[in-house]
């Protein structure tokens, strides 16, 4: 994705010209060692990016007694090159990085918007972030790649590696820690257009407890357009789901009616491998929904 490199380097050259002009600022690796480059030949940030061969570079400027510029991989927030006065400044700067704060900030959204404009594909994301925690196909039209703290939706194509990215969803698990379960990407699951009488739901469930989940029993209520009850069913999601891991499930044949307009969760029962049971209802259930 050379276009992204040039796009970001152009912005960096404009924004951090003062950093690049300081003679006492040098490029370092994240471990504090000097970045191996001939500084007499490679002098601009654009040249450093091109020389590094690193794709998908963003930036993070930290200001203290010295200016420090960190180039990172967007979405993963993994530092690649640090422009600083010395190795001690590199270590100090990197300690201030906060991945969870980045994932809730405008910067992450901005990075993703740039990727959208440049036509990023599923293969690009896998190269950038590695294998997801979970990968799920939704209605044959989309594939959801779930990573810690966020997921990326890709539009399916005849060639999976060319599926373009479509949507970034970030999650806040602070409320879900109380219930022990984070619920994301929950939607009504309509069957194919040739069968209007079959309805279900789909969703992703993250284990925020310290115990390993064996089963999740999800009780849902189906309603019509004026919120009348059409039916109540309980679906069984089979684990295992370890601590901080997620499982995505799709239930398509729960209800048989052509008047269902919505499906919502009324309660969840979790059975752990140690045999204990936890019931989630009311306000605690509401706080378990983590999609932002």
Image (cartoon, rainbow, N blue to C red):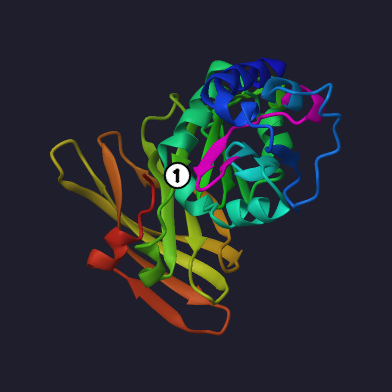
> Residue sitting at 43 percent across and 70 percent down?
180
> Residue sitting at 47 percent across and 29 percent down?
110
Q: Give yes or no for residue 57 being in the magenta stretch.
A: yes
Residue 35 in view (yes/no)? yes
Task: Please name whichever residue, 167 or 205, is drawn nearer the observer in this view of the structure.
Answer: 167
> Residue sitting at 20 percent across and 39 percent down?
224
On screen, residue 170 versus residue 197, left or right, reads right
Q: Quadrant of the N terminus?
A: top right
Q: Position of residue 7 (x, y in %)?
A: 60, 17
Task: Please name whichever residue, 207 or 201, is drawn nearer the observer in this view of the structure.
Answer: 207
Q: Quadrant of the C terminus?
A: top left
SS for callout 1: strand
Mark 1 nearby-residue class (10 Å; few <14, some 14–19, many ≥20): many
Q: Position of residue 105 (x, y in %)?
A: 42, 42
Determine whether 55 is above or below 157 in the image. Answer: below
The residue beneath circle 1 is 170
On screen, residue 84 versus residue 254, left or right, reads right
Q: Position of residue 65 (x, y in %)?
A: 52, 48
Give, as a single range, the part of the protein colored magenta. Answer: 49-68
Q: Position of residue 142 (x, y in %)?
A: 54, 30
């Amino acid at each position: 994705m050379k276009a992204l490199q040039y796009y970001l380097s152009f912005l960096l050259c404009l924004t951090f010209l003062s950093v690049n002009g300081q003679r006492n600022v040098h490029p370092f690796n994240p471990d504090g060692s000097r970045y191996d480059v001939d500084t007499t030949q490679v002098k601009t940030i654009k040249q450093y990016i091109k020389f590094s061969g690193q794709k998908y570079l963003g930036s993070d400027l930290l200001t203290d007694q010295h200016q420090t510029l960190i180039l990172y991989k967007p979405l993963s927030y993994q530092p690649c090159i640090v422009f600083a006065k010395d190795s001690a400044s590199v270590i100090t700067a990197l300690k201030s990085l906060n991945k969870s704060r980045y994932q809730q900030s405008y910067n992450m959204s901005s990075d993703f918007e740039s990727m959208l404009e440049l036509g990023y594909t599923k293969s690009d994301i896998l190269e950038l972030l590695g294998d997801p925690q979970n990968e799920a196909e939704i209605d044959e039209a989309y594939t959801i790649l779930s990573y810690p703290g966020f997921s990326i939706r890709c539009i399916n194509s005849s060639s999976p590696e060319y599926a373009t990215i479509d949507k970034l969803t970030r999650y806040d698990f602070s409320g879900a820690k109380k219930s022990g379960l984070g619920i994301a990407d929950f939607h009504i699951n309509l069957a194919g257009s040739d069968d209007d009488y079959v309805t279900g739901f789909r969703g992703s469930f993250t284990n925020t407890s310290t115990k390993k989940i064996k089963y999740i029993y999800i009780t849902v209520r189906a309603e019509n357009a004026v919120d009348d009850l059409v039916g109540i069913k309980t679906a069984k999601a089979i684990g295992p789901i370890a601590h901080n891991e997620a499982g995505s499930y799709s239930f398509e044949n729960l209800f048989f009616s052509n008047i269902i307009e919505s499906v919502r969760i009324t309660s969840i029962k979790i059975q752990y491998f140690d045999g204990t049971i936890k019931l989630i209802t009311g306000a605690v259930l509401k706080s378990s929904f983590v999609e932002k």
